[in-house]
Amino acid sequence: MKLHHDSISHYLSQILNQGLDFDISSIESFETDEDRELAYGLICLSEDLTFYKQRSDNLRDNLKEALFNSSAIAITNTEGVITEVNDIFVELTGYSKHRLLGNTFSLISSNYHSEEYFRSMWNCISSGKVWEGEFRNQSKNGNLFWVNTHIFPIRNTDGVIIEYWSIRRNITEKKNIEEELKLAHFKLEKASETKDFLMKEMHHRIKNNLQLLVSMLRLMIANENELRGKLEKIINRINSIATVHEVFYKHIEKGSIDLKTYLSTTFDKERFAGLEDTHLEISGESVSVSIEQCTYLGIVMNELITNSTKYAWLNEKSCSKKIIINYRNQQDQLLIDYYDNGQGFSSENVNKGFGSSIIEMLVEEQLGGNLKINSTSGMHATIEMPLISE
Protein backbone atom coordinates (compact mmCIF):
# COMPACT_ATOMS: atom_id res chain seq x y z
CA MET A 1 0.00 0.00 0.00
CA LYS A 2 1.11 3.52 -0.72
CA LEU A 3 0.19 6.59 1.35
CA HIS A 4 -0.71 9.87 -0.35
CA HIS A 5 -2.63 13.03 0.58
CA ASP A 6 -6.12 11.60 0.03
CA SER A 7 -5.42 8.34 1.82
CA ILE A 8 -3.92 10.17 4.82
CA SER A 9 -7.05 12.39 5.04
CA HIS A 10 -9.19 9.26 4.87
CA TYR A 11 -7.26 7.60 7.71
CA LEU A 12 -7.46 10.76 9.87
CA SER A 13 -11.23 10.77 9.37
CA GLN A 14 -11.33 7.14 10.54
CA ILE A 15 -9.31 8.03 13.65
CA LEU A 16 -11.74 10.81 14.58
CA ASN A 17 -14.79 8.60 14.04
CA GLN A 18 -14.96 4.79 14.09
CA GLY A 19 -11.20 4.04 14.11
CA LEU A 20 -8.53 2.82 11.64
CA ASP A 21 -9.24 -0.17 9.38
CA PHE A 22 -5.67 -1.48 9.76
CA ASP A 23 -3.44 -2.29 12.76
CA ILE A 24 0.22 -2.90 13.61
CA SER A 25 0.24 -6.24 11.74
CA SER A 26 -0.43 -4.41 8.48
CA ILE A 27 2.65 -2.17 8.68
CA GLU A 28 4.76 -4.34 6.35
CA SER A 29 2.19 -4.04 3.59
CA PHE A 30 3.16 -0.42 3.01
CA GLU A 31 5.67 0.07 0.19
CA THR A 32 8.29 2.42 1.61
CA ASP A 33 9.92 2.98 4.97
CA GLU A 34 8.50 6.48 4.96
CA ASP A 35 4.97 5.14 4.46
CA ARG A 36 5.50 2.50 7.19
CA GLU A 37 6.67 5.18 9.63
CA LEU A 38 3.68 7.35 8.79
CA ALA A 39 1.30 4.38 9.17
CA TYR A 40 2.83 3.59 12.56
CA GLY A 41 2.27 7.22 13.62
CA LEU A 42 -1.38 7.01 12.57
CA ILE A 43 -1.84 3.83 14.63
CA CYS A 44 -0.31 5.49 17.72
CA LEU A 45 -2.51 8.59 17.27
CA SER A 46 -5.61 6.40 16.93
CA GLU A 47 -4.78 4.43 20.06
CA ASP A 48 -4.11 7.62 22.08
CA LEU A 49 -7.38 9.22 21.01
CA THR A 50 -9.27 6.00 21.73
CA PHE A 51 -7.75 5.86 25.21
CA TYR A 52 -8.63 9.47 26.06
CA LYS A 53 -12.11 9.10 24.63
CA GLN A 54 -12.71 5.96 26.69
CA ARG A 55 -11.34 7.72 29.75
CA SER A 56 -13.61 10.72 29.09
CA ASP A 57 -16.62 8.44 28.63
CA ASN A 58 -15.75 6.61 31.85
CA LEU A 59 -15.48 9.88 33.77
CA ARG A 60 -18.82 11.03 32.42
CA ASP A 61 -20.46 7.71 33.27
CA ASN A 62 -19.03 7.78 36.79
CA LEU A 63 -20.24 11.35 37.27
CA LYS A 64 -23.70 10.43 36.00
CA GLU A 65 -23.88 7.47 38.37
CA ALA A 66 -22.87 9.61 41.35
CA LEU A 67 -25.43 12.29 40.51
CA PHE A 68 -28.20 9.77 39.86
CA ASN A 69 -27.81 8.49 43.41
CA SER A 70 -27.93 11.89 45.11
CA SER A 71 -30.18 14.33 43.23
CA ALA A 72 -33.22 14.50 40.97
CA ILE A 73 -31.72 14.17 37.49
CA ALA A 74 -33.29 14.58 34.06
CA ILE A 75 -31.36 14.51 30.79
CA THR A 76 -32.75 16.06 27.62
CA ASN A 77 -31.61 16.33 24.04
CA THR A 78 -30.86 19.71 22.52
CA GLU A 79 -34.57 20.18 21.76
CA GLY A 80 -35.52 19.80 25.42
CA VAL A 81 -37.05 16.34 25.06
CA ILE A 82 -36.43 14.15 28.11
CA THR A 83 -34.28 11.15 27.29
CA GLU A 84 -33.35 9.88 30.75
CA VAL A 85 -34.50 10.37 34.38
CA ASN A 86 -33.56 8.80 37.69
CA ASP A 87 -35.81 7.39 40.41
CA ILE A 88 -35.53 10.53 42.56
CA PHE A 89 -36.92 12.64 39.72
CA VAL A 90 -39.74 10.13 39.21
CA GLU A 91 -40.63 10.28 42.90
CA LEU A 92 -40.48 14.08 42.96
CA THR A 93 -42.83 14.56 39.99
CA GLY A 94 -45.18 11.64 40.59
CA TYR A 95 -45.00 10.62 36.93
CA SER A 96 -43.72 7.25 35.79
CA LYS A 97 -40.48 7.03 33.87
CA HIS A 98 -42.42 5.86 30.82
CA ARG A 99 -44.64 8.97 30.99
CA LEU A 100 -41.70 11.32 31.37
CA LEU A 101 -39.45 9.99 28.59
CA GLY A 102 -40.20 11.61 25.27
CA ASN A 103 -41.92 14.57 26.92
CA THR A 104 -40.59 18.06 27.74
CA PHE A 105 -40.59 19.77 31.11
CA SER A 106 -43.86 21.43 30.15
CA LEU A 107 -45.43 18.25 31.57
CA ILE A 108 -44.61 19.44 35.09
CA SER A 109 -45.00 23.19 34.45
CA SER A 110 -47.10 25.20 36.90
CA ASN A 111 -47.37 28.17 34.48
CA TYR A 112 -45.72 30.32 37.15
CA HIS A 113 -42.69 31.54 35.21
CA SER A 114 -42.76 33.94 32.27
CA GLU A 115 -41.71 33.18 28.70
CA GLU A 116 -38.81 35.58 29.17
CA TYR A 117 -37.59 33.49 32.12
CA PHE A 118 -37.38 30.35 29.96
CA ARG A 119 -35.96 32.27 27.00
CA SER A 120 -33.14 33.55 29.18
CA MET A 121 -32.44 30.03 30.41
CA TRP A 122 -32.28 28.60 26.89
CA ASN A 123 -30.03 31.42 25.67
CA CYS A 124 -27.66 30.63 28.54
CA ILE A 125 -27.37 26.86 28.11
CA SER A 126 -27.38 26.88 24.30
CA SER A 127 -24.33 29.16 24.45
CA GLY A 128 -22.56 26.50 26.49
CA LYS A 129 -22.89 28.12 29.90
CA VAL A 130 -24.23 26.54 33.07
CA TRP A 131 -27.61 27.94 34.18
CA GLU A 132 -28.71 28.12 37.81
CA GLY A 133 -32.15 29.14 39.01
CA GLU A 134 -35.39 28.06 40.61
CA PHE A 135 -38.53 26.49 39.17
CA ARG A 136 -41.97 26.15 40.63
CA ASN A 137 -43.28 22.87 39.21
CA GLN A 138 -46.48 20.87 39.59
CA SER A 139 -46.53 17.15 40.33
CA LYS A 140 -48.96 14.65 38.83
CA ASN A 141 -51.31 14.92 41.83
CA GLY A 142 -51.46 18.73 41.49
CA ASN A 143 -49.10 19.64 44.34
CA LEU A 144 -46.78 22.56 43.73
CA PHE A 145 -43.11 22.16 44.55
CA TRP A 146 -39.99 24.30 44.18
CA VAL A 147 -36.61 23.08 42.94
CA ASN A 148 -33.21 24.71 42.81
CA THR A 149 -31.86 23.74 39.39
CA HIS A 150 -28.49 23.57 37.65
CA ILE A 151 -28.49 22.79 33.92
CA PHE A 152 -25.19 21.66 32.39
CA PRO A 153 -24.56 21.54 28.61
CA ILE A 154 -22.77 18.28 27.69
CA ARG A 155 -20.47 18.27 24.65
CA ASN A 156 -19.09 15.47 22.52
CA THR A 157 -15.44 15.10 21.60
CA ASP A 158 -15.90 17.64 18.82
CA GLY A 159 -17.09 20.23 21.34
CA VAL A 160 -20.68 20.12 20.07
CA ILE A 161 -23.49 20.25 22.66
CA ILE A 162 -25.36 16.95 22.46
CA GLU A 163 -27.54 17.02 25.59
CA TYR A 164 -28.38 18.88 28.80
CA TRP A 165 -28.18 17.53 32.33
CA SER A 166 -30.70 19.05 34.71
CA ILE A 167 -29.86 18.56 38.38
CA ARG A 168 -32.65 19.52 40.77
CA ARG A 169 -32.90 19.88 44.54
CA ASN A 170 -36.24 20.12 46.32
CA ILE A 171 -36.44 23.47 48.18
CA THR A 172 -40.22 23.53 48.76
CA GLU A 173 -39.91 23.70 52.55
CA LYS A 174 -37.42 26.58 52.30
CA LYS A 175 -39.71 28.51 49.94
CA ASN A 176 -42.72 27.90 52.19
CA ILE A 177 -40.80 29.32 55.15
CA GLU A 178 -39.80 32.34 53.05
CA GLU A 179 -43.45 32.92 52.11
CA GLU A 180 -44.53 32.61 55.74
CA LEU A 181 -41.88 35.14 56.74
CA LYS A 182 -43.01 37.53 53.99
CA LEU A 183 -46.62 37.19 55.16
CA ALA A 184 -45.63 37.70 58.78
CA HIS A 185 -43.59 40.78 57.81
CA PHE A 186 -46.56 42.16 55.86
CA LYS A 187 -48.89 41.60 58.82
CA LEU A 188 -46.34 43.19 61.14
CA GLU A 189 -46.11 46.27 58.92
CA LYS A 190 -49.90 46.55 58.84
CA ALA A 191 -50.07 46.13 62.62
CA SER A 192 -47.39 48.78 63.03
CA GLU A 193 -49.33 51.17 60.79
CA THR A 194 -52.49 50.50 62.81
CA LYS A 195 -50.59 51.01 66.07
CA ASP A 196 -49.15 54.30 64.84
CA PHE A 197 -52.61 55.48 63.84
CA LEU A 198 -54.10 54.49 67.20
CA MET A 199 -51.21 56.11 69.07
CA LYS A 200 -51.69 59.38 67.19
CA GLU A 201 -55.44 59.28 67.72
CA MET A 202 -55.03 58.50 71.44
CA HIS A 203 -52.40 61.22 71.79
CA HIS A 204 -54.69 63.77 70.15
CA ARG A 205 -57.69 62.88 72.32
CA ILE A 206 -55.77 62.72 75.62
CA LYS A 207 -54.08 66.04 74.92
CA ASN A 208 -57.37 67.75 74.06
CA ASN A 209 -59.18 66.30 77.07
CA LEU A 210 -56.44 67.38 79.48
CA GLN A 211 -56.37 70.87 78.00
CA LEU A 212 -60.15 71.09 78.39
CA LEU A 213 -59.89 69.96 82.02
CA VAL A 214 -57.21 72.58 82.78
CA SER A 215 -59.36 75.30 81.20
CA MET A 216 -62.35 74.30 83.31
CA LEU A 217 -60.27 74.33 86.50
CA ARG A 218 -58.86 77.77 85.67
CA LEU A 219 -62.44 79.06 85.36
CA MET A 220 -63.15 77.61 88.78
CA ILE A 221 -60.07 79.38 90.22
CA ALA A 222 -61.34 82.69 88.92
CA ASN A 223 -64.62 82.22 90.79
CA GLU A 224 -63.46 80.34 93.90
CA ASN A 225 -60.68 82.14 95.77
CA GLU A 226 -60.79 79.69 98.65
CA LEU A 227 -60.05 76.77 96.34
CA ARG A 228 -57.23 78.51 94.48
CA GLY A 229 -54.35 76.66 96.14
CA LYS A 230 -55.91 73.23 95.84
CA LEU A 231 -57.00 73.77 92.27
CA GLU A 232 -53.57 75.06 91.23
CA LYS A 233 -52.05 71.92 92.68
CA ILE A 234 -54.48 69.79 90.65
CA ILE A 235 -53.69 71.81 87.53
CA ASN A 236 -49.97 71.20 88.09
CA ARG A 237 -50.58 67.46 88.30
CA ILE A 238 -52.69 67.50 85.14
CA ASN A 239 -50.07 69.54 83.29
CA SER A 240 -47.41 67.13 84.51
CA ILE A 241 -49.44 64.17 83.23
CA ALA A 242 -49.99 65.92 79.88
CA THR A 243 -46.28 66.71 79.54
CA VAL A 244 -45.28 63.18 80.50
CA HIS A 245 -47.67 61.86 77.88
CA GLU A 246 -46.23 64.25 75.27
CA VAL A 247 -42.63 63.27 76.00
CA PHE A 248 -43.43 59.55 76.23
CA TYR A 249 -45.27 59.67 72.92
CA LYS A 250 -42.12 61.01 71.21
CA HIS A 251 -39.80 58.46 72.85
CA ILE A 252 -42.01 55.35 73.03
CA GLU A 253 -40.00 53.46 70.40
CA LYS A 254 -36.66 54.19 72.05
CA GLY A 255 -37.85 53.17 75.53
CA SER A 256 -35.79 55.77 77.40
CA ILE A 257 -35.58 59.57 77.80
CA ASP A 258 -32.80 62.03 78.52
CA LEU A 259 -33.49 63.12 82.10
CA LYS A 260 -32.66 66.80 81.61
CA THR A 261 -34.89 67.04 78.55
CA TYR A 262 -37.70 65.36 80.43
CA LEU A 263 -37.45 67.54 83.56
CA SER A 264 -37.01 70.79 81.61
CA THR A 265 -40.04 70.04 79.46
CA THR A 266 -42.24 68.84 82.31
CA PHE A 267 -41.54 71.78 84.63
CA ASP A 268 -41.52 74.56 82.09
CA LYS A 269 -42.79 77.84 83.60
CA GLU A 270 -45.46 78.20 80.93
CA ARG A 271 -46.97 74.85 81.85
CA PHE A 272 -46.41 74.63 85.58
CA ALA A 273 -48.49 77.00 87.74
CA GLY A 274 -46.62 78.57 90.65
CA LEU A 275 -43.20 78.88 88.99
CA GLU A 276 -43.89 82.25 87.40
CA ASP A 277 -41.70 84.19 89.86
CA THR A 278 -39.33 81.32 90.73
CA HIS A 279 -35.94 80.58 89.17
CA LEU A 280 -35.75 76.86 88.39
CA GLU A 281 -32.29 75.46 87.61
CA ILE A 282 -31.84 71.90 86.36
CA SER A 283 -28.30 70.61 85.89
CA GLY A 284 -26.63 67.27 85.36
CA GLU A 285 -24.79 65.10 82.89
CA SER A 286 -26.47 63.29 80.02
CA VAL A 287 -28.38 60.43 81.61
CA SER A 288 -30.97 58.22 79.89
CA VAL A 289 -33.74 56.99 82.16
CA SER A 290 -36.39 54.41 81.36
CA ILE A 291 -39.91 55.62 80.63
CA GLU A 292 -41.26 53.72 83.63
CA GLN A 293 -38.82 55.42 86.03
CA CYS A 294 -39.58 58.82 84.49
CA THR A 295 -43.26 58.28 85.18
CA TYR A 296 -42.66 58.04 88.91
CA LEU A 297 -39.88 60.65 88.96
CA GLY A 298 -42.22 63.13 87.31
CA ILE A 299 -44.78 62.71 90.09
CA VAL A 300 -42.08 62.96 92.79
CA MET A 301 -40.64 66.18 91.32
CA ASN A 302 -44.15 67.56 90.88
CA GLU A 303 -44.89 67.07 94.59
CA LEU A 304 -41.57 68.55 95.70
CA ILE A 305 -41.93 71.65 93.51
CA THR A 306 -45.58 72.10 94.49
CA ASN A 307 -44.72 71.92 98.20
CA SER A 308 -41.90 74.43 97.66
CA THR A 309 -44.09 76.94 95.81
CA LYS A 310 -46.81 76.53 98.42
CA TYR A 311 -44.81 76.62 101.71
CA ALA A 312 -41.17 77.65 101.15
CA TRP A 313 -41.65 81.41 100.93
CA LEU A 314 -44.79 82.05 103.00
CA ASN A 315 -43.08 84.73 105.07
CA GLU A 316 -40.60 85.87 102.42
CA LYS A 317 -42.74 87.49 99.76
CA SER A 318 -40.02 89.74 98.34
CA CYS A 319 -37.10 87.29 98.28
CA SER A 320 -35.51 85.84 95.14
CA LYS A 321 -37.10 82.41 94.90
CA LYS A 322 -34.87 79.64 93.66
CA ILE A 323 -35.22 75.87 93.13
CA ILE A 324 -32.22 73.78 92.07
CA ILE A 325 -32.35 70.19 90.84
CA ASN A 326 -29.00 68.50 90.33
CA TYR A 327 -28.47 64.88 89.33
CA ARG A 328 -25.62 62.54 88.41
CA ASN A 329 -24.93 58.91 87.56
CA GLN A 330 -22.72 57.27 90.15
CA GLN A 331 -21.93 53.64 89.32
CA ASP A 332 -25.42 52.99 87.88
CA GLN A 333 -27.04 54.75 90.82
CA LEU A 334 -28.99 57.90 90.00
CA LEU A 335 -28.42 60.59 92.67
CA ILE A 336 -30.82 63.54 92.67
CA ASP A 337 -30.41 66.59 94.93
CA TYR A 338 -33.38 68.94 95.25
CA TYR A 339 -32.98 72.37 96.89
CA ASP A 340 -35.04 75.45 97.45
CA ASN A 341 -33.88 78.61 99.24
CA GLY A 342 -37.04 79.02 101.28
CA GLN A 343 -37.53 79.23 105.03
CA GLY A 344 -37.71 75.50 105.55
CA PHE A 345 -40.73 73.48 106.61
CA SER A 346 -42.08 73.52 110.13
CA SER A 347 -44.24 70.79 111.56
CA GLU A 348 -47.24 73.07 111.07
CA ASN A 349 -46.95 73.64 107.33
CA VAL A 350 -45.44 70.39 106.08
CA ASN A 351 -48.18 68.51 104.27
CA LYS A 352 -48.48 65.23 106.09
CA GLY A 353 -51.14 64.01 103.70
CA PHE A 354 -51.00 63.08 100.04
CA GLY A 355 -47.92 65.14 99.07
CA SER A 356 -45.23 63.85 101.42
CA SER A 357 -46.61 60.35 101.74
CA ILE A 358 -46.76 59.77 97.98
CA ILE A 359 -43.15 60.99 97.56
CA GLU A 360 -41.87 58.50 100.09
CA MET A 361 -44.00 55.67 98.70
CA LEU A 362 -42.94 56.27 95.08
CA VAL A 363 -39.22 56.62 95.85
CA GLU A 364 -39.00 53.54 98.07
CA GLU A 365 -41.57 51.17 96.59
CA GLN A 366 -41.74 52.05 92.88
CA LEU A 367 -38.23 53.33 92.25
CA GLY A 368 -36.46 51.05 94.75
CA GLY A 369 -34.54 53.99 96.18
CA ASN A 370 -33.94 55.97 99.35
CA LEU A 371 -35.27 59.40 100.27
CA LYS A 372 -33.70 61.85 102.74
CA ILE A 373 -35.24 65.24 103.57
CA ASN A 374 -33.67 68.11 105.49
CA SER A 375 -35.90 71.17 105.84
CA THR A 376 -34.29 73.17 108.64
CA SER A 377 -32.74 75.73 106.30
CA GLY A 378 -34.54 75.67 103.02
CA MET A 379 -35.74 72.40 101.56
CA HIS A 380 -33.14 69.75 100.68
CA ALA A 381 -34.26 66.33 99.44
CA THR A 382 -31.82 63.64 98.34
CA ILE A 383 -32.97 60.68 96.25
CA GLU A 384 -30.77 57.70 95.48
CA MET A 385 -32.13 54.98 93.16
CA PRO A 386 -30.89 52.32 90.73
CA LEU A 387 -30.62 53.62 87.17
CA ILE A 388 -32.49 51.78 84.44
CA SER A 389 -31.87 53.20 80.99
CA GLU A 390 -34.34 51.05 79.05
Image (spheres, rainbow, N blue to C red):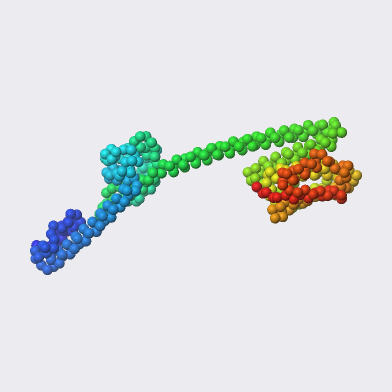
The residue under the point 15% across, 58% down is 20
Q: Quadrant of residue 232?
A: top right
Tell me: 81 left or right of 13. right
* Percent of width and height locating residue 356: 80, 42
User: Can residue 298 be seen from the camera position used here?
Assistant: no
201 is higher (above) or lower (below) than 24: above
* Percent of width and height locating residue 59: 28, 55
Residue at far bottom of view: 33
* Percent of width and height locating residue 237: 77, 39
Q: Quadrant of residue 135?
A: top left
Tell me: 307 left or right of 107. right
Observer-nearest of 357 and 257:
357
For the N terminus, the image quarter is bottom left
Instruction: State how many labels appear.
Output: 0
Q: Quadrant of residue 197?
A: top right
* Percent of width and height locating residue 112: 40, 38
The residue under the point 84% across, 34% down is 227
The residue under the point 17% across, 64% down is 41
Observer-nearest of 204 and 233:
233
The residue under the point 63% across, 43% down is 253
356 is higher (above) or lower (below) than 8: above
User: Can residue 249 be seen from the camera position used here?
Assistant: yes
